[in-house]
Image (cartoon, rainbow, N blue to C red):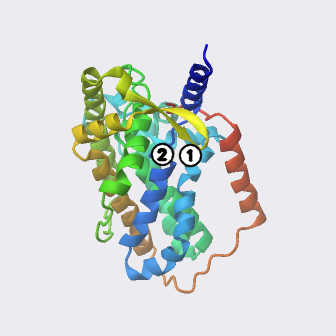
């Protein structure tokens, strides 16, 4: 075997062993970052100085998947396990859903539409208590789960095309497309956050939109692959000093064109939703004055927890379901 070929194979296997994060780490960071600019003045004065924190910690829930088995289901729902769209038999309330299907089944198929309102309630409580560190931590993490709820393949049991020979489509849609196209073509100027009357109903609507789009996401990739020369679909690129196998740029652009802006629309919808959930938590807490809130430096326990998160992510394998390329 030639040296080049060995290198190529090594690169391919490295890429194949990399876990895909929901929206990719880059996408999650962008969503939380841009959400800050949709907030009203009372909130932006508090959030903006912490924009780097909010952006960097947007990925903590994915890191936690390497340490905590219970974390995995919070990022998705295999909603097609519950009949067909719009899944009228699936209770939107958690306790009713548990009564009907049992907690084990619900957790096996993912819990994101129930987890988002639970996080929202915690954030509202943190605003009531005026706990700046907790407001920021919960805001960053709530942003992550809301972002995941907007990804069509997070609402499908065929989440990585594993049932249809489309392995890798998860990362293609939520990492490769936005990382290539967002900077050069997309706009995240969105307007203002809105008050959400019913956070549970709101996130269920977004999850149902995701579920309805999942078939299109899969079908368009399948159709494009059939008419696209196989050797031009894949390219080898150097990333962080490593040779990795990627979907080729031309293929990524063609796939995005076939979806007519869907990834950008979902990312914009996610940004709007994140800002609106933050804003709603603050309103529901009685619009506390945030000027007096100062974030205290992290306690030794918080620092230790963050260190564990990063080490677990660097060294470990994901616990439970993963969306590997
Ligand atoms: Zn996630």
Quote the CA–CA distance across marks 2 and 1: 10 Å
Q: Position of residue 131 (x, y in %)?
A: 60, 73
Image quadrant containing the N terminus: top right
Residue placed at 59% from the left, 52% from the top?
Answer: 60
Decide if residue 94 is on the left or right side of residue 204: right
Residue 2 x/y as whole percent: 60, 17
Which mark is nearer the camera, 2 or 1? 2
Vertical side of 39 occupied by 97: above or below: above
Give the residue at x 63% y 76%: 295
104 with respect to 67 (left or right):
left
Alpha-carbon neighbours of circle 2 within 10 Å: few (<14), some, or many (≥20)?
Answer: many
Q: Which residue is mark 2?
A: 24
Q: Position of residue 21 (x, y in %)?
A: 51, 42
| Viewer-nearest residue: 284 or 320 | 320
Return the mark for residue 62: 1
Is 157 or 151 nearer to us in this picture? 151
Residue at 31% x, 53% y: name it. Answer: 201
Above or below: residue 279 compared with residue 252: below
Image quadrant in which you'd find residue 10:
top right
Q: Is mark 1 within 8 Å of ligand 1?
A: yes
Q: Quadrant of residue 56?
A: bottom right
- Judged left or right of residue 44, residue 212 is left
Residue 158, visible in the rendered structure:
no
Q: Position of residue 189 (x, y in %)?
A: 31, 66
């Amino acid at each position: 075997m030639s040296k080049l070929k060995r290198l190529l194979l090594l690169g391919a296997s490295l890429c194949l062993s990399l876990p895909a994060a929901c929206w990719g780490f880059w996408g999650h960071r962008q969503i939380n970052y841009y959400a800050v600019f949709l907030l009203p003045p009372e909130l932006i004065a508090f959030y903006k100085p912490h924009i780097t924190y909010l952006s960097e910690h947007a990925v903590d829930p994915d890191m936690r998947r390497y340490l905590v088995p219970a974390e995995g289901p919070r990022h998705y729902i295999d909603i097609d396990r519950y009949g067909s769209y719009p899944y009228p038999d699936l209770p939107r309330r958690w306790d009713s859903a548990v009564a009907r299907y049992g907690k084990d089944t619900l957790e096996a198929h993912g819990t994101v539409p129930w987890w988002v309102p639970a996080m929202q309630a915690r954030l509202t409580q943190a605003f009531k208590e005026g706990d700046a560190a907790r407001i920021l931590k919960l805001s960053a993490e709530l942003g992550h789960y809301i972002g995941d709820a907007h990804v069509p393949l997070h609402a499908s049991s065929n989440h990585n095309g594993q049932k249809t020979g489309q392995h890798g489509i998860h990362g293609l849609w939520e990492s490769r497309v936005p990382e290539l196209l967002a900077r050069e073509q997309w706009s995240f100027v969105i307007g203002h956050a809105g008050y959400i009357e019913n956070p549970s109903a709101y996130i269920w609507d977004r999850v149902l939109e995701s579920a309805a789009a999942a078939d299109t996401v899969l079908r368009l990739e399948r159709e494009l692959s059939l008419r696209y020369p196989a050797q031009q679909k894949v390219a080898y690129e150097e990333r962080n000093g490593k040779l990795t196998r990627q979907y080729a740029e031309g293929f990524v652009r063609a796939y995005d064109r076939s979806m007519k802006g869907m990834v950008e629309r979902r990312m914009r919808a996610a940004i709007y939703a994140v800002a609106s959930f933050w804003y709603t938590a603050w309103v529901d807490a009685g619009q506390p004055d945030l000027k007096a809130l100062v974030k205290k430096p992290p306690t030794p326990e918080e620092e230790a927890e963050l260190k564990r998160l990063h080490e677990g992510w660097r060294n470990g394998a994901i616990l439970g379901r993963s969306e590997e390329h």
